[in-house]
Image (cartoon, grey):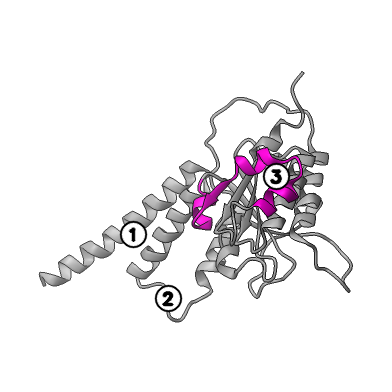
Amino acid sequence: MPDKYAPLANIKIVLVETSHPGNIGGVARAMKNMGLTQLALVNPNDYPSHTASSRASGAGDILANAQVFASLDEALADCSLVIGASARFRKVAWPQLDVRQTAALALEKSANKVALVFGREDSGLSNAEMDRCHYLAHIPSNPEYTSLNIAAAVQVFAYECRMACQPVIEQAQGYRHDVASSEQMEGFYGHLHQALQDIEFLDPDKNARFMRRMRRLFNRSQLDVKEVDILRGILTAAQRQVQLREEKQKHV
């Protein structure tokens, strides 16, 4: 009989610049309670730490296997779906999910690696870090007191992911491509930004929010690898036409 909790193996908890090691240990314990195993730490303030190990209380294996990264991009490189946890709304509205919707989507997309990203204890995720996310997720809570400890927040998300698990249903076989990874999407966004400048569509000094809106547009689409290749091919062709035009002008 297939393990209905097997999809949890592809859900990665990512903590960004956690300031207190005890919170890392608390997160590890919350993860093990619910059967999640992948923990990624981005620039933790104090780690490894005896305090983290003490707070983990039996979840030392989660800490032992945790990966430490210098940047969020490195932590997300192998992930195809990235969901950022935040209690704050942004000037550029992101697609919003509550924690139960987040769990359902994470399980739906768990054939590829999924990241649930949690920011700093005091300030959460920056706008630049939110740019790496496809969705903004929140825990419905008392509007008069919305603050949750990071380990408690991870516990809620992990619990909902476990409850959302269903027996794996084999997908119909057919022509398909894997969803593009975070690393592949970042390559596309960099290419798009440069190409829009090359064709003189984008002035980066006057369109600070433009690329954020482009990210939101393409993140909603959940591009697959082939689609990214096609779009980058179009961008390359447009850049080539600009180069040819400039070369002709030089010879006039």
Q: Nearer the viewer, residue 206 or 64?
A: 64
- How many residues crowd mark 1 within 10 Å: few (<14), some (14–19), many (20+)? some
Q: Which label sits in the foreground, 2 or 1? A: 2
Q: Amino acid at mark 2?
A: Pro
Q: Which label sits in the foreground, 3 or 1? A: 3
Using residue 164 as the reference point, say whether residue 176 is left or right of it: left
Mark sitting earlier along the chain (2/1): 2
| Disc marking residue 238 | 1
Quarter holding the N terminus?
Answer: top right
Locate residue 79, reporting x and y percent. 56, 45
Residue reaching furthest to the top: 1
Q: Which label sits in the foreground, 3 or 2? A: 3
Locate residue 75, reporting x and y percent. 54, 51
Q: Which residues are magenta?
A: 50-77
Q: Identify the residue at horizontal 83%, vertical 40% (top origin).
A: 163
- How many residues crowd mark 3 within 10 Å: few (<14), some (14–19), many (20+)? many
In this figure, which residue is indicated by the disc labeled 3?
106
Locate residue 177, reporting x and y percent. 52, 36
Locate residue 120, reporting x and y percent. 65, 65
Q: Identify the residue at horizontal 71%, vertical 57% (top origin).
A: 23
Q: Identify the residue at horizontal 74%, vertical 50% (top origin).
A: 55
Q: Nearer the viewer, residue 242 or 82?
A: 82
Q: CA distance from mark 3 to mark 2?
A: 34 Å
Q: Secondary structure at mark 3?
A: helix
Q: Nearer the viewer, residue 164 or 225?
A: 164
In this figure, which residue is indicated by the disc labeled 2?
204
Mark sitting earlier along the chain (3/2): 3
Q: Nearer the viewer, residue 117 or 218?
A: 117
